[in-house]
Image (tube, grey):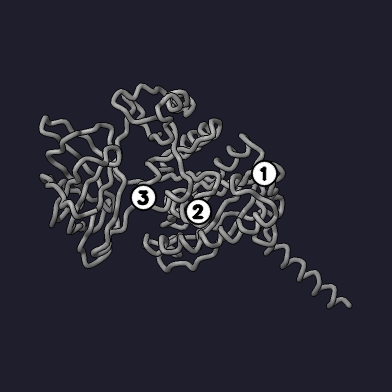
Amino acid sequence: MLRLYFLISLLCLVRSDTDEICPSFTKLSFHSAVVGTGLNVKLMLYSRRNPTCAQAINSTVFGNLNVTKKTTFLVHGFRPTGSPPVWIGDLVQGLLSVEDINVVVVDWNRGATTVIYSHASNKTRKVAKVLKEFIDQMLAEGASLDHIYMIGVSLGAHISGFVGKMYNGKLGRITGMQYFKCDHQRSVYLYLSSLRESCTITAYPCDSYRDYRNGQCATCGMPQKESCPLVGYYADNWKDYLRQKDPPMTKAFFDTAEEKPFCIYHYFVDIITWNKNIRRGSITIKLRDKAGNTTESKINHEPSTFQKYHQVSLLARFNQDLDKVAAISLVFSTGSVIGPKYKLRILRMRLRSLTHPERPQLCRYDLVLMENAETVFQPILCPKLQM
């Protein structure tokens, strides 16, 4: 009898140690990023009934999820070190403070944690399928697509776009954010400001990625124009301006600089490399016109992975708009203070404006970037056949 009691007590002890009362975001190490992780998607629900203690939910267990209320999914992106995103907690609490909704944190850290970016990106469609299966069950229980919102950061924005495409653009809203971790509290504030005006913010136009076109993605906020007189970051300051346009404006840029005239101009920098080995690092690009005016962008929001004959498209943000670029300079850096210096061998570099897509695209071929050394060159017009 004593042995039976001891065995039951031991089983209870083991169960109490392994069961999570409040499920937490998966925390991995850099070792996991090196060896790689298999995909495992966890859904964690927060609501005003449980604002600080998440509930693990799935297609058969909804917990406190109320299908009659709006449901917002938070989807993170690439995690090269395996650490949890620092912004999730603030955004969850901010969303719940604004409105009584369901907030579902999509934890796919087992899949996003890898030092090879393409390995994580290859799993994004699988994550989207998991979310669609869950949303299908919500719809079966009486939920509405109009009340389902997606907030995706980095690769999470791609996942959100894929989900939107699966529902033929009928989701209530998709917000795609590219640059989030520099000042996550300000980014949370920007998003919450836009919530009060029922609009979505993003760092670049949604249709710069094909899959967002089917996600009913719209942006609002500060339109790009020469004077950019906005002081501050309140989305509702531009509400009347957008509505008075003929026809009313439904797309604008909200990415702003911190100093006058506040304008930010976006370019894609497309790079194809031919290094035998993979290179990971950041790019700094500087533009100069014939009058000597210069503008610089440090593309370091997340280290890029350069593979042989693969194109990497980087989003560059400039605070000046140079109509005719006479010279371009590039600097490649791995961020290493000590250790060997690397070369980045570029087969083709292409510069294309998102703010003014009608402008000719500029190219350069066969470049070798020595790490931390500036390489200056004159661009040429890209062949018209290249998209």
Q: Are marks 1 and 2 in contact (CB under 8 Å)?
A: no
For the residues labelled 1 and 3, the Cα–Cα distance comes to: 35 Å
The amino acid at mark 1 is Lys
Tag 3 residue: 302
Question: What residue is rendered at 16% in x and 44% in y?
Answer: 329
Q: Nearer the viewer, residue 318 or 331?
A: 318
The amino acid at mark 3 is Glu
Question: What residue is rendered at 43% in x and 67% in y?
Answer: 36
Q: Residues within 10 Å of mark 1 (few under 14, many from 20)?
A: some
Q: Residues within 10 Å of mark 3 (few under 14, many from 20)?
A: some
Tag 1 residue: 69
Residue 22 appears left or right of 347: right
Residue 16 appears left or right of 71: right
Which of the marked residues, 1 or 2, is nearer the chain's N terminus? 1
Local secondary structure at mark 1: loop
For the residues labelled 2 and 3, the Cα–Cα distance comes to: 31 Å
Tag 2 residue: 168
The amino acid at mark 2 is Asn
Q: Nearer the viewer, residue 227 or 77?
A: 227
Residue furthest out toward the front? 247
